[in-house]
Amino acid sequence: MTQQAPLPLDGIRVVEFTHMVMGPTCGMILADLGAEVIKVEPLTGDNTRKLLGSGAGFFPMFNRNKKSIAVDVKTPQGKEIVLKLIADADVFSENFKSGTMDKLGFSYDSLSKLNEQLIYVSHKGFLPGPYDHRTALDEVVQMMGGLAYMTGPAGRPLRAGSSVNDIMGGMFGAIGVLASLQQRARTGKGQEVASALFENNVFLVAQHMMQFAVTGKAANPMPDRISAWGVYDVFTVKNGEQIFLSAVSDTQWAILCKEFGFDDLRDDARLLSNNDRVRAREWLIPILRERFAGLSAAELSQRFEQAGLPYAPITRPHDLFEDPHLLATGGLAPVTIAADNTGAGKAIETRVALLPLALNGERLGVRCPPPSLGADTRDLLKGIGYSEADINTLLANGVIGALTNHDEGEN
């Protein structure tokens, strides 16, 4: 995004003690909106930098537009550095196990006495209650919160194909921060914000809870559900390709029948309304599968597109790098990522998905890539009054991490 005017959160400082996905998502949203987000990392770095497999995308996705300071907060000097940063901060964000911040001396009670305007946001597994002692993961709350049951076929609970609770939990944390900033503008005081994985998951499945409340019937898992729409399915077509096709209104059904010459189905008295077609799905869908089977996914896409009918190719995540809509609308931004997420190794030039919103028609872009470990340590220390000699002493004593080329002004 190439705004000349300041971004909405320009001038807001966030100090974050976060790792994995939930807390970093909150910080990324605030950073994309213009806040200065300072990621406090141990001398060895956020462990998320080192994850393999499905975790390899966590750090580069959720830590853009941030600064990094590497400091040993368990030392008195390290703790002092962080407290100086927090003294002038607007937001403190954390997502560690309950009690961790208390042990480090960074509890809400402690920090609010230091800075009464501070907004303190915690990202936890559970809000306070009988479960809050448990260790939670996205998959844990998906299993216990009904989402895995709804996603998989009967008898095979299956986690959703993304870190949905972690990401949304971070989003709700950011929403809480934004609301608290608005309230602080009126009261002059900060407050504590809490977001939790389990409660987020319950919010996601609440539509199915309400379905039971309204109908008295338990919701079936999505693969076995009674669809609300007559035509709303994945079809296997020519050469074994798959495509999602749908017609969710009586008008769309009439258009589908006209486009493909299904006069017999259009005139069938058993298929006049959407609800009629829902009741007829057991025999209607096999007929449609047979009729579409000889057509290619490309032809079906073209004809559904021209007719204005809902359809979708079955796309793999990496295919989205070449999605024409994302490329044309600026939904992907160029970014440089260190090969090991720590600043070492060969850099990777790629593109990253932006926040799914626009302000005045502009997307919120990448102002700086995910930081190398401790990349901003020197500048941040100078900003809170440390001299060059002080910094060298802290480095020699192992309080701060080895300074990178970025710190030395070589990048």
Image (tube, grey):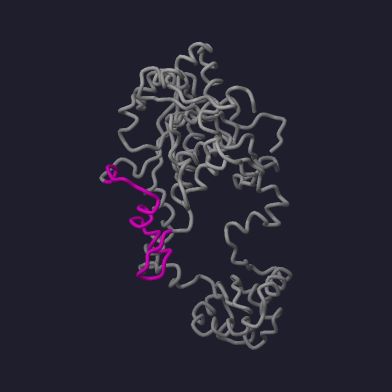
The image quarter containing residue 125 is top left
The image quarter containing residue 76 is top left
For this rendering, which residue is in front, 283 or 69? Answer: 69
Name the residue rendered at 52%, 47% in the picture.
57
Name the residue rendered at 55%, 35% in the picture.
343
The quadrant the N terminus occupies is top right
The image quarter containing residue 406 is top right
Looking at the rendering, the stretch of residues picked out in magenta corresponds to 131-159
Rendering coords of residue 27 (x, y %): 51, 36
Name the residue rendered at 34%, 44% in the picture.
126
- Please check the rendered image and state whether residue 351 is part of the magenta-colored stretch, yes or no: no
Rendering coords of residue 209 (x, y %): 38, 60
Direction from residue 83 to residue 5 in the image, left or right: right
- Please check the rendered image and state whether residue 151 is part of the magenta-colored stretch, yes or no: yes
The quadrant the C terminus occupies is top right
- In this figure, what is the number of numbered marks? 0
For this rendering, which residue is in front, 179 or 376? Answer: 376
Rendering coords of residue 199 (x, y %): 38, 48
In this view, 257 is above or below 205: below
Name the residue rendered at 71%, 34% in the picture.
3
Rendering coords of residue 132 (x, y %): 29, 43
